[in-house]
Image (tube, grey):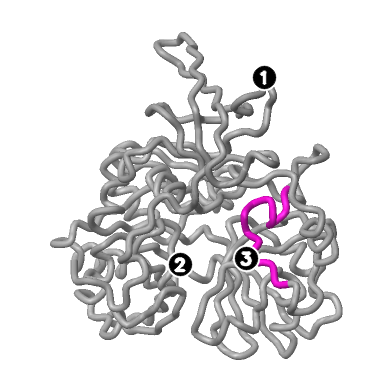
C-alpha cells in the first residue's frame, strides 16, 4: 500500500475535525485553532473584539460539537443520576435541561455539566471533559446503560440578541415560545433539529443539536437566515469574555477536577464554588452527601466570588491580600477581564473566610508586561454579586424581535 493510499493514523492527525470544520476553516482569517476534548476548534476567527461584540449586539455561531455527550437510559436512569449528581434530577421533567455537578466521596467536585431529560428514562449528560470511567463506576448496581455519543451528535451554539429572529427566519415556527432551559424539536428543511434554550454567554441564546450529516447544510442555512441580523462565527476567546461577565465557571480555569488534582487542598467543593443552590440534601443519598453536610455545618473556609477591581488592567492570576493586614494573603484570581459591556475590571476569585462576604475589600497584586518589562500594581477590589451582566432578554419569553 502506498503512503498516499494509507488511511490517516492517530499520529498523523492527533485531533479530530468536527462536522463544521471546513466551514470554520473557510471563515478563519487567523488560522488560530486550539484543542478541545480531542477535537480541533477555532480560538479566534477575525478578532476577539469583533466576535465579542457580536455576542452582545447581534448573533453568533460557536461549534459545540466537542462537548462530551453521554446517553443515559434504562429503568434506573433517574435513580442513577440522582445518586451521581448533587441536585434532584426528578425535578428535571421531560423536555427540560438542568445544570448539575457531581462529586467524589469527599464532596470535592469531579465535573459540572447539563442534564437533558429527553423522555422518561432517557437522558443526555453533556460535559466539557470525558468522564466515562467515573460514570460507569457509579452505575454499578443500577439497571442503566451509559454510552458516549459525542461523535454521533453535532452541535452549534447560536447566541446573542438576534438569535431568536435568526431561528424564526430559518423557519422554526414556535421557537420563540421556548422558555429558558426548555427543549423543542423542529424541522429545518429536510433535517430534524433539537433546540434547547441554553448557552454559556448569559445572554439570549440557543443550542442546536443535529445529525452530523446535516451539519454543513444547517450551518449554511443559519448563515443565510442571519445575514440581515449580523450573524457571524466566533471562537473560544470571545466566548470566554462573555462567560466571565455571566459569572459562569470553567473547568481547569476556575476549578480542577478532584480526579486530576495532585496536591492536597487543590480540589474544591460545590459550596466553595458558590454552587450551594445545586446541592439538595433533602432528596436522599448521593455521592459526597455526608462530607458536604459536614462542610455546611462547620462553614466553608473559602469561596469563589466576583470581584470589582479598580483600574482597567485585568488581574490575571493575581494574589489577593487583606485590606488592613499588610502582606496577609487571602486568595487568588482565577479568571479576569476588562468587561467591554459593563465597563468594569472584573474577576472570579477564590477568597478565604471571612473576606468573601459581599462588600468586603481586598487588594489585588497585578503584574503587567510592558514592552518586556514587568510592572507591579496594587489595586483595591470589592466582592460583588454575580453575574456581572444579566440582560432581561436572556429570560424574556417570547424574546423581543431585535
Q: Position of residue 160 (x, y in %)?
A: 30, 60
- Residue under pointer 3: 277
In this picture, is 158 found above or below 304? Answer: below
Stretch in magenta:
268-280
- Towards the viewer: 36 or 177: 177
Judged from the image, the secondary structure of the residue bearing numbered disc 1 is: loop
Look at the numbered discs 2 and 1 and tell me whether their residues touch, using CB distance below 8 Å. no
Res 288 quadrant in image: bottom right
Could you tell me how far apart the alpha carbons at marks 2 and 1 are, in whole angstroms?
A: 50 Å
Q: Earlier in the sequence, mark 2 or mark 1?
A: 2
Which residue in the structure is indicated by mark 2?
154
> Is 275 in the magenta?
yes
Q: Residue at x 58, y 73 (%)?
A: 115
Q: Position of residue 37 (x, y in %)?
A: 58, 52
Q: Residue at x 43, y 63 (%)?
A: 199
Instruction: Point out residue 181 in the picture as x, y percentages from the top left corner.
Output: 46, 74
Visible residue check, residue 395:
yes
What percent of the width, then of the height, locates residue 195?
40, 76
Amino acid at each position: 500500500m502506498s503512503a498516499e493510499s494509507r488511511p490517516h493514523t492517530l499520529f498523523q492527525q492527533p485531533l479530530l475535525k468536527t462536522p463544521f470544520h471546513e466551514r470554520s476553516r473557510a471563515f478563519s482569517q487567523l488560522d488560530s485553532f486550539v484543542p478541545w476534548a480531542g477535537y480541533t476548534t477555532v480560538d479566534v476567527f477575525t478578532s476577539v473584539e469583533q466576535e465579542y461584540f457580536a455576542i452582545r449586539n447581534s448573533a453568533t455561531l460557536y461549534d459545540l460539537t466537542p462537548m462530551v455527550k453521554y446517553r443515559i437510559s434504562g429503568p434506573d436512569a433517574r435513580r442513577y443520576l440522582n445518586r451521581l449528581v448533587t441536585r434532584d434530577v426528578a425535578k428535571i421533567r421531560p423536555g427540560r435541561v438542568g445544570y448539575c455537578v457531581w462529586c467524589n466521596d469527599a464532596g470535592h467536585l469531579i465535573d459540572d455539566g447539563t442534564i437533558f431529560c429527553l423522555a422518561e428514562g432517557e437522558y443526555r449528560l453533556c460535559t466539557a471533559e470525558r468522564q466515562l470511567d467515573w460514570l460507569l463506576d457509579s452505575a454499578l448496581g443500577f439497571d442503566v446503560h451509559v454510552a458516549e455519543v459525542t461523535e454521533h451528535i453535532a452541535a452549534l451554539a447560536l447566541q446573542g440578541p438576534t438569535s431568536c429572529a435568526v431561528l424564526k427566519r430559518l423557519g422554526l415556527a414556535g421557537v420563540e415560545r421556548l422558555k429558558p432551559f426548555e427543549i423543542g424539536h423542529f424541522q429545518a428543511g429536510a433535517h430534524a433539529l433539537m433546540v434547547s434554550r441554553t448557552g454559556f454567554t448569559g445572554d439570549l441564546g440557543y443550542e442546536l443539536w443535529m445529525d452530523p450529516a446535516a451539519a454543513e447544510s444547517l450551518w449554511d442555512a443559519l448563515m443565510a437566515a442571519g445575514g440581515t441580523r449580523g450573524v457571524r462565527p466566533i471562537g473560544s476567546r470571545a466566548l470566554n469574555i462573555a462567560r466571565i461577565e455571566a459569572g459562569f465557571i470553567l473547568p481547569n480555569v476556575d476549578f480542577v477536577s478532584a480526579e486530576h488534582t495532585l496536591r492536597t487542598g487543590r480540589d474544591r467543593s460545590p459550596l466553595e464554588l458558590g454552587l450551594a443552590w445545586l446541592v439538595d440534601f433533602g432528596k436522599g443519598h448521593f455521592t459526597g452527601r455526608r462530607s458536604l453536610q459536614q462542610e455546611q455545618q462547620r462553614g466553608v473556609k473559602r469561596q469563589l466570588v466576583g470581584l470589582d477591581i479598580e483600574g482597567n488592567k485585568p488581574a490575571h492570576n493575581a494574589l489577593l491580600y487583606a485590606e488592613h493586614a499588610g502582606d496577609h494573603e487571602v486568595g487568588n484570581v482565577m479568571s479576569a477581564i476588562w468587561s467591554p459591556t459593563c465597563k468594569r475590571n472584573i474577576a472570579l476569585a477564590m477568597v478565604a473566610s471571612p473576606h468573601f462576604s459581599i462588600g468586603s475589600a481586598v487588594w489585588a497584586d497585578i503584574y503587567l508586561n510592558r514592552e518586556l518589562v514587568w510592572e507591579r500594581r496594587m489595586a483595591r477590589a470589592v466582592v460583588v454579586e454575580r453575574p456581572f451582566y444579566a440582560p432581561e432578554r436572556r429570560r424574556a419569553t417570547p424574546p423581543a424581535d431585535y
